[in-house]
Every structure is written in C-alpha cells, then in structure tokens.
Amino acid sequence: MFNKNTIISFLLIILLASSVKAISATDSLLYITKTSQADTIKIKAFNELVKKVFYYDPHQAMAYSDSALSLSKKINNTYWEGITRINKSSLLYHTEKYKEGIEQASICLKIFSSLRSELNMAKSYNNLCLLYQAVGDYPTALDFAYQALRIAEKINNLSQLANIHNNIGMIYYLLGMQNKSTEYFLKSLDDNIKSENKQGMAIGYLNMSSIFVEKNELKKAQEFLLKALQINKEFNHNVAIAQCYTQLSNIQYLKKNTDSALIYINWAKDIYLQIKDSLGLATVHYNKSKYLKNNNILAALEELIIAERYIAPNIDLQQKISIYSALSELYAIKKDYKNAYQSFHLANLLKDSLNNFEQKKKVQEMQIRFETKRMENEISRLQQITETKEKENTQQQNELKRSKSQQALLLFIVSALAIMSVLLIAILMNRTKLNKKLSLQNLQILKQKEEKETLLKEIHHRVKNNLQIVNSLLRLQSNQINDEKITELFEEAQNRIITMALIHEKIYRTENLAQIDFKEYIEALSGNLVKTYNLNKLIKIEKNIEVEHFGIDQLVPIGLILNEMLSNSFKHAFTNILEGRIWISFRINSEKKYELIVGDNGKGLNSIEFENPSSLGLELIKTFTEQLNGCIELNTKKGTEYKIVF
C-alpha cells in the first residue's frame, strides 16, 4: 500500500510547488525586493520567490514568505496578507509542519471570506483538505474538499476542479473505497486534459497507474506510469520523476523482475537523498526490504529499521502501518518474538485509528450532504432558467413589432443595391474580357511547364509504386517462411526498399524536383522504423538537422545508411531496457564538409565486429559511405555512435 503515499507526495510537489527556472529570474525578483518603491510590488516579488525556491530550498522559501507577510501587515493590505498565507500554508505542508499549516490556511479562509474572493476561498479550503488528510483526519479533509468543490463548480474553474477532484479521489483511495476513488481520479484527469494542464495530467496518469496496480493489471499500470514519467521529464520535476521510478520498481517487483526493481528504486533513492525527502526515503527503504525479503532476511530487516527511522518524525499513518506490519513479520521469521509482538501491536493500534467505523460513516454522511446540496442548487438553477425564458419571450414579441417597421426600409435599400450591382457587373464583364486574353496566353506557357514537371513526377511515382509492389511481394513471401533469421532478412530488405520508396515519394510530392526537403524525409524514415519495430518502450529520438535540402544522387545512399544505423539501434541497443535515447545530427562542419552523426545510449557495438563486419547492414553502411567519398568513425564509450564526414 506504499504507493498511496507516493501519490500524496507527488500531488504535493506538482500541486503546491513550481519548478525551479532560470537563476536570472530569481536574481531579478531579489533586485525588485531591494529597489522597488512600491510595497505591493515587493510583496508580490517575495511570493514569486517562494514559488521559485521552495522546491529545492524550503528554508529560504520560508524566509521570503515571512518577509512578504511582515510587509503586508505593515501596510495593512489584507488581500496580499491572504495570498502570502496561502503560499505559506502550502510551504508548511511541504515541510511536514501540518499543525502550523492548518493555522495559516484557516486565517486565509477568514480573510478571503470577508473579501468574498471565491477563487481564493476555494484554494484555502483545498489546502485545509490536504493538511487534514496528511494528519489522517479524513472526514474533516473531505468536508473541506466538498466545500472547495461547490465553489469551483460555481465559478467553473477547471484548474481548481482538477485539483479538488484529485484530492477527493485520494481520500477515498486511502479509505480503501476503490470505486469512488477511481471515479474522482478520472474526473480530475478529464479536467486536466480539457485545460491542457500537462502537470495535472501527470498526476492523473500516476493515480490511474496505482489503481491498476491494485487490480493487478500491470500492463495498463505501466502504460499510464510511462506517460507520467515522460511529462515529468519534460518539465524536469526531479522529485516527481523519483515517484515514478518508485512506482516502476514496484511494478517490476510484481512482475518478479527483482533486479530491475532494485535498479529503479535506487534511482529514486538518489533523488530523495539529494533533496532530503524523508517520506520518499521511507518509501524507498520499505520497498527495498520487500524486494530483499525472500533472499536476505537480515538485509531486509536493516532496510525496514532505516525506513522506521525516516518515518518517525512524521505522522503518516499508512506508512507507519506498512512498516510496523513488515517489521513484525521479519522479527517473527528471526524468532525475535518480543519485537515481533511490539511491532504487530503498534500496527494494529494504527489500523484501528485509520479504519475507524465512525470515520467512514462521517465520510458517507458528508457525501450525501454534498449531493443533496448539489440537487438543491440544480433545482434553483432550473427555476432561474424558466424565469429568464419568460422574460425573453416578452422581449421577442416587442422585437417582432419593431422588425416589421424595419422591413419596409430594408426592402428599399435592397432594391437600390440590386440596381447598383447590375451596373457594377456590366463594368466588370468588360474588364474580364481583356484580362481573359492575357490569362489564356499565360495558361499556355504554364501548361507546357506543368506538363514537363508532371511527366517527371509521374516517373518517380511509378518508381515508388514499383518499389512498393516489390516490398509487398517480399512481405507475402516472408509470411510463408518459418525460419526467424530468414524472416528477419526479409524485413531488413523491406526496410531498405521503403527507404528508397520514400525518396521517390518525396520527389513526386515536392514542388522543386531538384531539391528534396531533408528534414521531412528524416521524420518519415524514423517514423516508419518506429512503426516497423513496434517497441513497447520509452525511446526518445532527438534530431538536430541543419541541412535542409538534398538532390536524389546523394539522398539515396544517405537514406540507406540512416536506415541501417537506426535499425541496428532499434533491434539491438535496448534489449531488456525500458527507456533510451537515439540522436541524429546532420550539419556542415568547419571544413565545409557534411557531417552525419547517429548514436544511441544502448549497450554498444563491438569495435571488432565493426572493423570486420559479418552482417549485410554494416557492410552496406561502409559501401554507401565510400560511394559518398566519405570516411566513417565508430565511438562505443557510451552506447554506439557513428560519425560520417563527406
């Protein structure tokens, strides 16, 4: 059940903290706080600094928050005092000072209630929900969440709706009410997709991954998790990436891939150590204990003791239950029954407080109250719509009377315009006759030119079609062959034929027959190979193409070289690896020569095999390099990287 805490930490990071951006932006804000004459601008700058740094330096963020709060009190600006306290309550949540966070969020709520600022009231309720959820008071947390939801629905704020739906789903998830949690997680994901909020979508994907792990549908769980990981890497959210690695290690463990599970959990551990995240480190050591239990009881017990040490200052009930339950089991295996009983007793006490019947009953009562209030609001809304329609009917009758008097005037204007139009058409017809003669002459010239271009395009089109026919014949023939190696040779031949067919297709579709768009060709070629090998992995292809056009004489060997290099990467570089990187660079170097670099961070190619190639693919790479009057180099220090200069 530790994945529940993974989601909570992940939600905190994305929901309440901004990514660290350029240092120059932080310096600019600091300059404003020291030089601006306007106190409100200083307060705003301090609050922006809080968002900039609390992701990696919460102590400094707290200092900025205190400065903003002191200044807003000094000038008696209630609005900015409330904004500052909202950010401060988020920061206190992040630093696990939940009691102080509740005090700050409660003051925020009073301030914005008096100012009637509905959006900030919703944010205050939402922060109170998160803080009470963190201390295990789920009924109170849910009550605040529903109050936030009513306001967010009223003002139709998609961003707040996404956050609140997610928080409600999390509370139900922690209470073991899986159907309700799934319902609200899906609502949150839908809100984020509508508002194109990628960071919110990452939260939703991670939540759905956890749901499918609970259902033991590991393939779907991994698909959602890889989507979350890709977005978090795009935004460089290191802690969120660590949460994904933690979940990925759990999935690998459930698939009985213990070695892979340990690799991913150690990646997560490195990040948590860097930012001193005690909850994350507790999760890491708990999971490592679980992975090591079958083969090394002592190592597993040591990991659990470390996890208990990290969780001790905190009050996360679910993590404590998991750790004490696991400690009880391992102590019992070691026949240390005293410690086993103590751990078992502690786990049961915590379970009683977490699964209290009255707590679940309160949650259900709050849900009923919320749904009843929603129905009352809907009835009121429908009554208002009925009254509005009656007013509109009266207005329409008045408009009808006015429109009749206007129709006569409109008829006169239309008649006048019709007469003017007839005169204008007559003038235009005379001018059209003169233009028509010139147009006919131009058309004859263009027609001759187009006929020549069409003929050339048709030739390339037929060549492309013939290549596709050959490709289809090879595919049909390969379907009748049971030998895997021979089938693979057929597939390689098909890829080479498709590479040449793509060139002729580009010529057929281009306006300039002598020059072909090289970037478009690279996109088409790499896209075709991705579809061909259909890898269920997170492989990123990076392209840096500085040369825009090529003629067919050079493009054919270049295309075939690229086909062989990329095929080798897809087939051999990422065996037993879920994610990787391929890069393609093409430029003109300082010696005014073309320089093509293709590489990957996979397992690497044997240099002896390259010097004395046994495969047709490597032989073709060398042959076509010679055809270009070029030279080729191989670098295998970090994966495989070819460099061709011609």
Image (cartoon, rainbow, N blue to C red):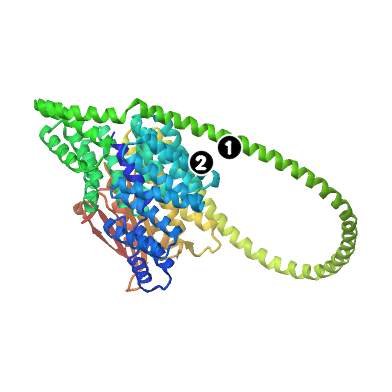
Question: Visible in this render: residue 233?
Answer: no
Q: Nearer the viewer, residue 327 or 349?
A: 349
Q: As drawn, which residue projects farthest toward the left?
A: 335
Q: Residue at x 82, y 45 (%)?
A: 397
**Residue 550's spot in the image, x, y percent?**
44, 64
Q: Residue at x 75, y 45 (%)?
A: 392
The image shows a total of numbered marks equal to 2
Q: Amino acid at mark 1?
A: Asn
How far apart, in angstroms, are the residues tagged by discs 1 and 2? 10 Å
**Residue 155's spot in the image, x, y percent?**
54, 47
Q: Which residue is mark 1?
A: 377
**Residue 96's spot in the image, x, y percent?**
28, 47
Q: Looking at the image, is 368 positioned above or below residue 83?
A: above
Q: Is residue 486 left or right of residue 121?
A: left
Q: Is residue 448 left or right of residue 19?
A: right
Question: Visible in this render: residue 102?
Answer: yes
Q: Looking at the image, is 596 positioned above or below residue 3?
A: below
Q: Residue at x 54, y 35 (%)?
A: 374
How would you rate the neighbour count of disc 2 (Cα within 10 Å): few for under 14, some for 14-19, many for 20 or more?
Answer: some
Q: Looking at the image, is 25 positioned above or below residue 404?
A: below
**Residue 300's spot in the image, x, y percent?**
14, 35
Q: Which residue is mark 2?
A: 150
Element under disc 2: helix
The quarter of the displayed image where residue 260 is located: top left
Assign the C terminus to one quadrant of the image.
Answer: bottom left
Mark nearer the N terminus (1 vs 2): 2
Q: Are discs 1 and 2 less than 8 Å apart at CB?
A: yes
Element under disc 1: helix
Assign the N terminus to one quadrant of the image.
Answer: top left
Q: Amino acid at mark 2?
A: Arg
Q: Looking at the image, is 254 positioned above or below residue 103?
A: above
How would you rate the neighbour count of disc 1 (Cα within 10 Å): few for under 14, some for 14-19, many for 20 or more?
Answer: some
